[in-house]
Image (spheres, rainbow, N blue to C red):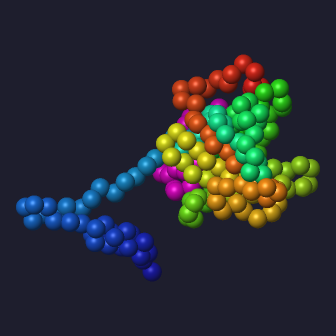
């Protein structure tokens, strides 16, 4: 039995076609984004990006935490010395005079606001924090719920709720951290 997928794709393009001023049918350009994936020790590969791959690609880079809040209390002592490096599957939390902490993360871009989970294993224990994120240009907001509890669903913390809120700015053009932050 032939697949209906190509037929449905063509149907959606045809339905979105509009006549131009001369009466000719104009089919809009279908946006296609591709992502170059670097592979250590191998040639890079170009892949067509799914929504999640594209969202992960948008986060890749080094971010400076400009604001940190926990339990409705701003924590400038934490924000002032914390950097976060995103790759496509892991996050490195880099804080001055501390060993870097590495966690894995997942995105769910089908919800609004977009959902964000980060997790780490400590021995046989899984520590999961679920929340939401918002990316606007070079600014990223991230709110996470308490460890192994409910998802944070808004960008807000209240006293004793266990949620944490990050506001970050991308460090453009810098691959190097400030001298006081460990590599």
Given residues 85 and 69, the one toward you in this image is 69
Between residue 67 and residue 144, name the one nearer to us. 67
Q: Is residue 50 above or below residue 65?
A: below
Where 86 falls versus 153 (above or below)? above
Screen quadrant of the N terminus: bottom left
Q: Residue at x 58, y 44 (%)?
A: 140
On the image, the x and y values in percent for residue 162 come to 80, 55
Q: Quadrant of residue 26?
A: bottom left
Q: Is residue 111 magenta?
A: no
Classify residue 144 as left or right of residue 126.
left
Which residue is at a point 75% across and 40% down the rendered structure image? 75
Q: Which residue is rendered at x = 72% and y = 55% of the image?
A: 157
At which x and y percent is residue 81? 74, 30
| Quadrant location, the C terminus | top right
Quarter of the image where one finds residue 181: top right
Residue extent of the magenta highlight: 40-56
Q: Give the farthest residue toward the right.
A: 123
Does 44 lie within the magenta span?
Answer: yes
- Judged from this view, the residue extending furthest toward the bottom is 1
**Residue farthest along the top direction in this orientation:** 179
Specify whether 134 is left or right of 10: right
Residue 128 appearing in the image: no
**Does residue 43 appear in this view?**
yes
How many numbered callouts? 0
In the figure, 140 relative to 64: above or below?
below
Q: Residue at x 43, y 49 (%)?
A: 33
């Amino acid at each position: 039995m032939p697949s209906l997928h190509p037929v449905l794709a063509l149907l959606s393009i045809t339905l979105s076609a509009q006549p131009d001023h001369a009466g000719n049918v104009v089919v809009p350009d279908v946006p296609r984004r591709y992502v170059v994936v670097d592979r250590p020790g191998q040639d890079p590969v170009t892949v067509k990006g799914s929504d999640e791959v594209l969202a992960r690609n948008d986060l890749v880079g080094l971010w400076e935490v400009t604001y940190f809040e926990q339990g409705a209390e701003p924590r400038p002592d934490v924000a002032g010395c914390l950097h976060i490096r995103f790759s496509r599957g892991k996050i490195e939390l880099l804080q001055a005079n501390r060993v870097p902490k590495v966690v894995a993360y997942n995105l769910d871009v089908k919800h609004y606001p977009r959902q964000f989970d980060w997790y780490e294993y400590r021995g046989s224990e899984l520590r999961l924090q679920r929340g939401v994120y918002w990316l606007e240009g070079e600014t990223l907001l991230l709110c996470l719920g308490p460890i192994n509890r409910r998802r944070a669903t808004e960008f807000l913390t209240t006293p004793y709720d266990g949620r944490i809120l990050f506001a970050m700015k991308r460090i453009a053009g810098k691959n190097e951290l400030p001298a006081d932050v460990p590599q």
